[in-house]
Image (cartoon, rainbow, N blue to C red):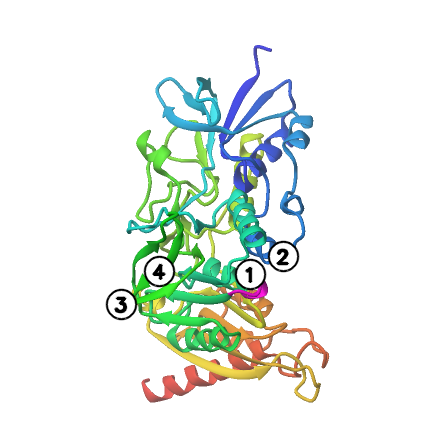
């Protein structure tokens, strides 16, 4: 018993449980005690699946759970649910833990600490924002609560505040449920991570499924009835009737606990780590949505809340804590989403981000079809590439289309990862058969057009 170390992990979702599982695989019960503190009702579940559960595509919330607490406990991981870490004492190497139900407190010692506290949803500081019927979407409990309201109260009108990924996916869920849906976004376009021309295509697709879209309108408050429930959203001088309001305003790194303890955070608000997921505080590691990482195209720190990153970072932390060696090099910012029939994808930098990172750019937008054009189920798609002037290096890509369009972003992400030029991309050996692609895949068409533009630009300005 004398040689056993104690690993304490704060947060029991993607990053935290990946770290716990990898550490356990490499070090048994006799070497390492692993305790995980999780304040929610669920651990190791797919938060990205919540909109599809709300919309009814997934029948049972349990289907989103990858592993139950009992399964982790059977593997020698002490997973403590409904327990919240409230303070980190670095000098004494211990964490204050409060029971969510009952309020009792204990101090938990550690030899190694992993902070995997996730992200915190943005909630507007506006009149009525805490009214009944105004729902955030962050954890599985939120999704269960919203679905219960939909099935019990049968609301007719939903207002979604925010036109990013979660806002649009929740709008789709409301449309699927048969509600009249309005989206309000303070930006001039939905999906502000896209360039305006591609964002306009998304706006057209949203309106095409019957959603009322209010862009450039700031929410001013939430009206309530005598029973305290929300009745309308005030935005842009209008009153938009609502039986249900969904907040999709994005998230920030949940780094408050770490920052209060004196653990370094960066310009994004995320915890600073090295490639092995170690913080700059001895014996403390961090992973998931609470950390910042390096964008491999711009070289700048970014905080991108995605389960893919969280799982990879947790895995890296766990391997290293278990005595192995692994690194997380960074991200290129790949994301996909679906709004009914419309598919949207992006990777790398958009034009605004590229300019902010100091790149001189060229860009092309090309139209194509998802399959050979002579097939009756071929649908239109548009691909945009942002490239560096003169060098022709790919800096980013965006896709808007219908079925089988979005996943083509993976080819662009791989090209970005390998710092390819668009000229090099024109020779990529991509799969072809009429049900899957035109003979010139849309990615290759865009690369070819971009390479021609780079060559033309070089001739004009030697």
**Disc with the residue nearer the chain's start (3 vs 1):** 1
Q: Residues within 10 Å of mark 2 (few under 14, many from 20)?
A: some
- Element class at badge 1: helix
> For the residues carrying marks 2 and 4, which lies nearer the camera in this image?
4
| Residue 253 relative to residue 331: left or right | left
> For the residues carrying marks 2 and 3, which lies nearer the camera in this image?
3
**Disc with the residue nearer the chain's start (2 vs 4):** 2
Marks 2 and 3, Cα distance to the nearest angstrom? 34 Å
Asked if residue 191 can be seen in this view, the reply is no
**Disc with the residue nearer the chain's start (1 vs 4):** 1
- 151 is higher (above) or lower (below) than 195: above
**Disc with the residue nearer the chain's start (2 vs 3):** 2
Q: Residue at x 55, y 82 (%)?
A: 445
Q: Are marks 3 and 1 in contact (CB under 8 Å)?
A: no
Marks 3 and 1, Cα distance to the nearest angstrom? 27 Å
| Residue 231 relative to residue 15: left or right | left
Residue 178 among those drawn in magenta? yes
Residue at mark 2: 56
Residue at mark 1: 173
- Element class at badge 2: loop
Marks 2 and 4, Cα distance to the nearest angstrom? 25 Å
- Element class at badge 3: loop
Residue at mark 4: 233
Residue 402 among those drawn in magenta? no
Residue 412: x and y in percent read 53, 68
Q: Are marks 2 and 3 in contact (CB under 8 Å)?
A: no
- Element class at badge 4: strand
């Amino acid at each position: 018993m004398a040689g056993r170390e104690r690993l304490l992990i704060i947060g029991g979702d993607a990053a935290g449980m990946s770290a716990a599982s990898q550490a356990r695989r490499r070090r048994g019960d006799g070497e390492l005690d692993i305790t995980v503190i999780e304040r929610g009702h669920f651990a190791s579940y797919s938060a990205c699946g919540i909109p599809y559960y709300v919309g009814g595509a997934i029948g049972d919330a349990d289907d989103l759970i990858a592993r139950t607490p009992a399964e982790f406990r059977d593997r020698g991981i002490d997973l403590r649910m409904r327990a919240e870490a409230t303070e980190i004492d670095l000098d004494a190497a211990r964490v204050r833990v409060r029971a969510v139900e009952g309020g009792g407190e204990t101090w938990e010692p550690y030899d190694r600490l992993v902070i995997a506290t996730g992200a915190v949803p943005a909630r507007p500081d506006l009149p009525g924002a805490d009214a009944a019927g105004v729902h955030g979407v962050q954890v599985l409990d939120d999704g269960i609560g919203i679905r219960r309201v939909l099935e019990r109260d049968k609301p007719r009108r939903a207002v979604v505040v925010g036109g990013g990924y979660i806002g649009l996916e929740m709008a789709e869920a409301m449309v699927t449920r048969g509600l009249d849906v309005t989206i309000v976004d303070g930006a001039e376009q939905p999906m502000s991570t896209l360039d305006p021309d591609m964002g306009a295509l998304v706006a057209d697709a949203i309106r095409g499924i019957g959603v009322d879209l209010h862009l450039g309108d700031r929410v001013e408050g939430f009206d309530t009835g005598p029973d305290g429930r929300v009745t309308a959203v005030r935005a842009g001088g209008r009153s938009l009737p609502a039986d249900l309001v969904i907040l999709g305003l994005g998230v920030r790194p949940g780094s408050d606990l770490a920052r209060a303890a004196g653990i370094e955070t960066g310009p994004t608000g995320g915890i600073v780590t090295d490639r092995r997921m170690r913080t700059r505080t001895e014996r403390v590691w961090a992973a998931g949505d609470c950390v910042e990482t390096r964008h491999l195209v711009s070289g700048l720190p970014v905080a991108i809340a995605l389960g893919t990153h969280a799982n990879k970072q947790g895995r890296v932390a766990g391997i290293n804590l278990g005595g192995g060696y692994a690194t997380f090099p960074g991200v290129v910012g790949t994301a996909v989403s679906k709004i009914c029939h419309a598919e949207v994808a992006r990777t790398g930098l958009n034009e605004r981000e590229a300019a902010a990172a100091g790149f001189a750019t060229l860009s092309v937008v090309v139209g194509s079809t998802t399959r050979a054009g002579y097939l009756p189920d071929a649908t239109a798609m548009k691909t945009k590439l942002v490239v560096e002037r003169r060098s022709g290096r790919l800096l980013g890509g965006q896709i808007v289309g219908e079925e089988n369009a979005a996943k083509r972003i993976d080819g662009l992400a791989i090209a970005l990862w390998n710092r390819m030029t668009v000229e090099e991309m024109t020779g990529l050996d991509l799969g072809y058969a009429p049900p899957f692609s035109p003979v010139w895949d849309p990615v290759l068409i865009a690369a070819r057009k971009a390479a021609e533009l780079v060559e033309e630009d070089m001739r004009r300005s030697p």
